[in-house]
Amino acid sequence: MVHVVSGLSLPAKEKYEVVVRLGEKEIKTDQPAAAAETYNRWNWRNKPEDGIFEAPYINLDDLGSIFVYLKAKMTIGSDKYICFYRSKVKDWLMTNDKNDVNKITWVQLKPDRAFSEVDDAYKAGIIGLRLGIVDITQGPYDWPTVFTERLKKRPGNLKVRAYIF
């Protein structure tokens, strides 16, 4: 399951799409619901039947890496993946612990040097998402109840004490 929340510090004032790729499976978001300056808000979640990935792999190590791409519409030609994030599949494995599931993970994108659309690494952006991978050889998993809980809009208050000399 993929739930893309928002993107911050994106390269330009555009409407981007986010693509999550695992092996040959590709899941794309729609256009963002809101876009302003270098911010996009998608709040997009894939349907459970779209997230099923059946492949002839023996174990999770054979899958390789998960890529999260920032896709830009180009005026001439096709779309380009201008920024990316790469991680291991095992970093996104889900357990039956509900606290583990409801966390948004913020990933720092890197510019894709093949296209040279983004010059500086700090302009590549940050994407907030929830991503869950389940190894079905370990038993069944109840997908509909996992991502249906609403996220908190604000975190709880914290006390911070600073000593300035």
Image: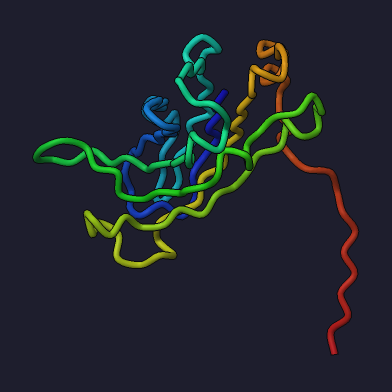
Identity of the residue drawn at 40% across and 49% down: 84
Residue 157 percent coordinates (x, y): 86, 49
Where residue 141 sits, quadrant-wise, is top right
Nearest to the observer: residue 57 or residue 148: 57
Compared across the picture, whether 137 is left or right of 5 comes to right
Q: Residue furthest left?
A: 76
Quadrant in which the N terminus is drawn: top right
- What color scheme is it? rainbow
Compared across the picture, whether 151 is left or right of 72 comes to right
Look at the picture and state if 44 lies above or below 40. above
Where residue 146 sits, quadrant-wise, is top right
Q: Residue furthest front?
A: 58
Quadrant in which the C terminus is drawn: bottom right
Residue 50 percent coordinates (x, y): 47, 14
Nearest to the observer: residue 165 or residue 123: 123
Q: Residue furthest bottom?
A: 165
Look at the picture and state if 91 lies above or below 26. below
Residue 32 percent coordinates (x, y): 41, 31
Compared across the picture, whether 71 is left or right of 10 comes to left
Identity of the residue drawn at 21% across and 37% down: 79
Look at the picture and state if 28 lies above or below 14. above
Nearest to the observer: residue 29 or residue 48: 48
Look at the picture and state if 159 lies above or below 107. below
Identity of the residue drawn at 35% across and 57% down: 111
Residue 104 percent coordinates (x, y): 65, 39
Total label count?
Answer: 0
Where residue 121 sits, quadrant-wise, is bottom left
Identity of the residue drawn at 55% across and 12% down: 48
